[in-house]
Image (cartoon, rainbow, N blue to C red):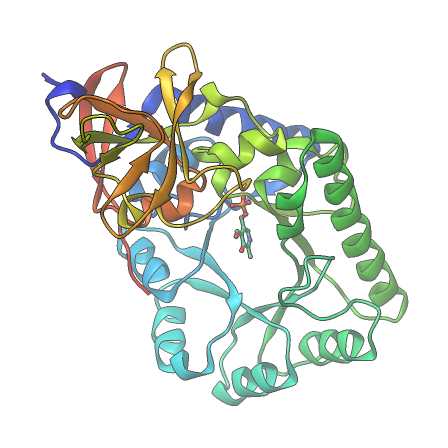
């Protein structure tokens, strides 16, 4: 048996008990609302984690890259939404993947719709709608939104899946109430737009929404058909700050060791820098919290990561060289994307290793 105390660092630990609990909770929430689950696998990039999600009932997966779609097709997944505005320089790969699986694409521009129609294939397409995040997606109040929906629904080749959005602005919330308000805004914007399209005679098969803060706090989902949370499987310090979860619900931590502590210094250096944790500032206070007691879910009041360079992490307290710290990342999706594998743990025992399939 390997103990986490024997692992070389930096190592990415995945707590299987916490992961399983998170997956069950979200799948029960989705079932309670009567919506289909299509989890975003960009968080974990792991067919093993997806296998646990599949066992709880999912209709397919959501991916952020064509590489992820290809990997999951190789692992037997036959239905994936590429929830990213379709990249027009990658249409050859789209064509190839669409022969292997039901690949659902996302578009929010006349250029993208035209290019997809130009392929002459029965491709599934969601119209991406901006529900308030203002990153991508058509303005649901705009004539362009109605025009694109009409064009997709009436296409001779394309199959219109419906309206899709992502409530990324829920990450600005600092309370459950604020996140729930964004969730309700997301729902009402989407369901309202779908209703207006239907009144105009345009058939809207589905309404797909996303985000872990919204799904963790939302109170009703009438009119929604599918949800695509990703981060909920791991959570992280950003979710704790929002109120989506408690510290003990965070499944991914970085095990790191102290490599330098100069005499008299009030700081020390650990082997977890930006290429272990990413530079996501999260809620803004630190670059990573450190556990005082992992089992109790207690964070250290003194030691925190205050700055990161490529491989160095600066800890705000002196610690002996060779001692270890367990770090709670600000953003588990970006942290996992820095590593090649998870050391899967139950308690302090390493029970498995799961590859992280990274690629574009
Ligand atoms: C388009 C889209 N859908 C769903 C998600 C999942 O959101 P979360 O990780 O907050 O659950 C994301 C995350 O960035 C996304 O970009």
Give the percent coordinates (x, y) of residue 233: 45, 34
Q: Nearer the viewer, residue 320 or 154?
A: 320
At x 47%, y 29%, the residue is: 23
- The residue that appears at 41% across and 21% down in the rendered structure is 302
Q: Position of residue 36 (x, y in %)?
A: 60, 42
Q: How many numbered dots are placed on residues in this image?
A: 0
| Quadrant showing the N terminus | top left
Vertical relation: 302 (above or below) 50 = above
Residue 351 lies, in percent from the top left, at 19, 22
The one nearer the camera, 282 or 235, is 282
Q: Is residue 249 above or below residue 141?
A: above
> In the image, is 154 to the left or to the right of 113?
right
Q: Quadrant of the C terminus?
A: bottom left
- Which of the pair 318/197 is nearer the observer? 318
Instruction: Give coordinates of residue 246: x percent, y percent.
Output: 53, 22
Rendered position, 354 above or below 160: above
Question: Does residue 167 appear left or right of residue 115 in this picture?
Answer: right
Residue nearest the viewer, comparing 203 with 136: 136
Left or right: 170, with 141 as reference point: left
């Amino acid at each position: 048996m390997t103990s986490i105390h024997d692992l070389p660092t930096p190592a990415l630990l995945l707590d299987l008990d916490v992961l399983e609990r998170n997956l069950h909770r979200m799948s029960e929430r989705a079932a309670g609302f009567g919506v289909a689950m299509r989890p975003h696998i960009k968080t974990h990039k792991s067919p093993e984690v997806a296998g646990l999600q599949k066992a709880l009932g999912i209709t397919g997966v959501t991916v952020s890259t064509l590489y992820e779609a290809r990997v999951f097709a190789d692992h037997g997944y036959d239905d994936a939404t590429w929830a990213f505005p379709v990249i027009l320089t990658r249409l050859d790969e789209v064509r190839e993947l669409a022969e292997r699986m039901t690949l659902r694409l996302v578009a929010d521009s006349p250029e993208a719709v035209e290019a997809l129609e130009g392929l002459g294939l029965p491709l599934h397409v969601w119209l991406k709608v901006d529900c308030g995040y203002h990153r991508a997606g058509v303005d649901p109040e705009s004539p362009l939104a109605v025009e694109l929906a009409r064009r997709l629904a009436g296409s001779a080749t394309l199959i219109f899946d419906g309206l899709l959005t992502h409530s990324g602005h829920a990450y600005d919330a600092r309370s459950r109430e604020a996140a729930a308000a964004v969730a309700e805004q997301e729902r009402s914007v989407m369901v309202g737009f779908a209703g207006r399209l239907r009144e105009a005679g345009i058939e809207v098969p589905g309404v797909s929404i996303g985000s872990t803060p919204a799904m963790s706090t939302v109170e009703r989902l009438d009119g929604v058909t599918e949800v695509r949370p990703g981060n909920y499987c791991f959570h992280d310090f950003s979710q704790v700050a929002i109120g989506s979860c408690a510290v003990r619900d965070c499944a991914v931590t970085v095990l790191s060791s102290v490599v330098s502590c100069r005499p008299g210094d009030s700081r020390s250096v650990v082997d977890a820098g930006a290429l272990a944790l990413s530079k996501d500032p999260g809620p803004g206070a630190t670059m990573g919290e450190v556990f005082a007691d992992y089992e109790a879910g207690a964070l250290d009041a003194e030691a925190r990561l205050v700055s990161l360079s490529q491989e160095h992490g600066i800890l705000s307290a002196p610690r002996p060289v060779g001692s270890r710290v367990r770090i709670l990342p600000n953003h588990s999706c970006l942290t996992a994307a820095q590593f090649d594998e998870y050391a899967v743990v139950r308690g302090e025992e390493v029970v498995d290793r799961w590859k992280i399939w990274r690629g574009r």
